[in-house]
Image: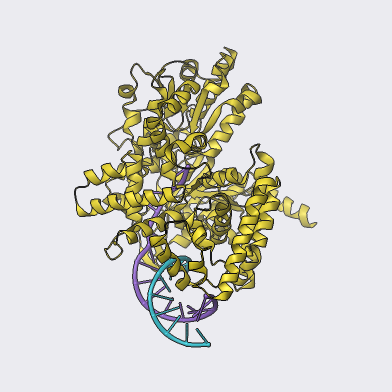
Chain colours: A yellow, B purple, C cyan
Amino acid sequence: MSLLEGLNDTQREAAATLNGPVLVLAGAGTGKTRVITYRIANMLENHIKAENILAVTFTNKAAKEMQERIGTLISEEDAKAVTIGTFHSFCVRVLHQDITKIGFTRNFTIAIQGDQKGIVKQALAELCYHRDDIDCDKVAQDISNYKNSLINPTEAKMEAVNNIEVKSANIYERYQQILKNQNMLDFDDLLYYVIKLWEECPKVLKKYQELYRYILVDEYQDTNGVQFRMLELLTKTNQNICVVGDDDQSIYGWRGAVVDYILNFQDYFKNAKVVKLEQNYRSTNNILLAANNVISVNKNRHSKALWSAKGAGADIAIIRNNNAEAEALFVVDAILEERFGYKTSYDNFAILYRSNHLSRILEMELKKARIPYKIVGGQSFYQRKEIIDAIAYLKLIVNYKDDQSLFRILNVPPRGIGDKSIETLKEIQLTDKRPFYELIQTEEFLLKISSKARKETENFIATIEKYKDIFFTEDNLSQTVNDYLSDVGYLNGILKIYKKREESEKRQENIYELINSVDYYERHNSDISLINFLEKFSLMDQNDKEEGEDGESVTLMTVHASKGLEYPFVFVVGLEKGLFPHFRSVEENSEDEERRLFYVAITRAQENLVISFAMERNKYGKNERQIPSHFLDDIPEELGTVMLADQYFTPPTDEDLGAEMDKIIAKFGS
DNA sequence: AGACCCAGGTTTTTT
DNA sequence: ACCTGGGTCT
């Protein structure tokens, strides 16, 4: 039992119970991940086979960390044999094995956001809804909701009660057909089709039930309908399921997460053992008290009393700024002051915000002050047009039926195939249902376009056909990607597409960066193939998409992306009416979730928490008067009062100044 | 076909 | 302030 000595009593109880359903209610910072890792280590020590364990985490990063930690606790070999991943990556594994049983082929590709929207548009055009006033994003959301609640198109059509719902259901049906024709799956399909596969092929399900006899789920509060069904099916026979989560940190309701699954776990899994973790190891008590006060306004929750052995700690600062620029400047100054004399690393700071667009102004001020920073997620590298285009080129190699990708790159760089030719192509497809890739090779199409365009198209196809073979036989993946993008004319084409020299060079550089990431993938994985790389690329999450400095740096991200992370010094900016809680949440009646989100933000902080708001903020190019968020009212005055930036800063002591002087003298000589 | 310009809408959160 | 889409001109 020496292994579990590093845990406190309740943690140990959770990690020691290996059989039957277990619910670990773990408040923020109470060592959730620690419990899971130790529990897995304990299983291995008790001769449960690593292959029989499945652990589901919320992000790839968490999965990787967990695998590493188990590796140091037991052995790297055993740790690698445990299946650890997100629901999505697990499902891709499952589908890779048996997807042919539900009518797809193994070389399916995963639709990205842009593809989804394109397919919705195509579907509603085919249904002649294009003149109707239909919001594509809303429909895409509806489709996602259907899948997350395991409603198939037929059921959706039956259940529709009004005209709008009927249309959504019809588009949903069409959308699924289009995806299937193209051998594509969207994100929700990855989960949805696993359920379909298991329900239609009990043998396949049985295989997984027998394989994964022990299941652990992290961040269980964010489980949605499909995911829950998956757990139900897997654990049907032995009920060995351990879920860890915190109902107060449920922040993905809009993505279909159902808090009820954690609130009523004991109804779903009979005789479940419930363990509550209440000792927080992360934050000072001032921070915890503020968090407790904020969250206690919510009614429907498991009551919890977080406490910490750390002292009261620093006061919480709530800063009022005249405008958003001043707020950003304040954050910069506060970081500089804290770092005065190099007392601490930039790594210790995080700046959190409700919506991505708030990062821009912060970035500007950080740049001016030459503070190194990185942005997690957001409009990142991987969403740049040139990257998506390059990926489309690669997807086409793997899955030629992928019309979305072909459509994206057919005329990028310009091959003389303009709107007119595209129109012709679409017309041909109305009667001839083959994929675009086949249609552009038909005489019917080639004779209708200019001779220059024809020649270019034939070259384009010849290059792709050539590389289909090369990718299959050649084992140097990054080199092949480089050659392919060059031969097909894309690498040089970029110089033509983007006229400004500076811009085109930057974009070309980004492509080389992508090729580097292929190289990195190649060096760090065992099962190297283009297909696997593309899957990995598609399944990357926010936390995989850090951008900015490599070395020591301040981290900027949304509160959502900060889930599970901690920093000694945390800034939460933009606590203003309409921003946080977001005005849309007021319409959607989900203020509870916004409050939980604020709770998550507060509980990221270990030692210092600084919350700020601005009285004026630029919106759509116009300055608008802002009102402080009413969430601020729930932080008791004795923990932190509203003050101006000037009142926050303490003048440096003589010693500080002396030390700083010494450094300058040492650097430049006297 | 493609470059260029202007108008209008746009910002929640993401696997 | 920024991006998309539609429209016009070469």
Which residue occupies 52% across, 41% down?
Answer: A106
Q: Is residue A101 visible?
A: yes
Q: Position of residue A244 (x, y in %)?
A: 44, 27
Q: Say which of A320 and A191 sits in front.
A: A191
Q: How many marks?
A: 0
- Furthest residue in direction left, as rendered: A161
Q: Position of residue A304 (x, y in %)?
A: 36, 28
Q: Nearer the viewer, residue A125 or A339?
A: A125
Which x, y percent locates residue A110?
49, 47
In the picture, which quadrant includes the C terminus of chain A? bottom right
Tell me, yes or no, if residue A549 can be seen here. no
Vertically, is A299 above or below A395?
Answer: above
Q: Residue at x 48, y 67 (%)?
A: A444
| Frontmost residue, A378 versus A92 | A92
Q: Residue at x 47, y 24 (%)?
A: A207
Q: In the picture shown, does residue A208 fall above or below A431? A: above
Displayed quadrant of residue A455: bottom right
Place of residue A567 in the rendered image (x, y in percent of width and height, measured from the top left): 54, 40
Relative to A567, A274 lies left or right: left
Q: A91 or B12: which is nearer to us?
A: A91
On the rendered image, what quadrant is the N terminus of chain A found in? top right
Q: Residue furthest right?
A: A669
Q: Residue furthest front?
A: A443
Looking at the rendering, which quadrant does residue A193 occupy?
Answer: top left
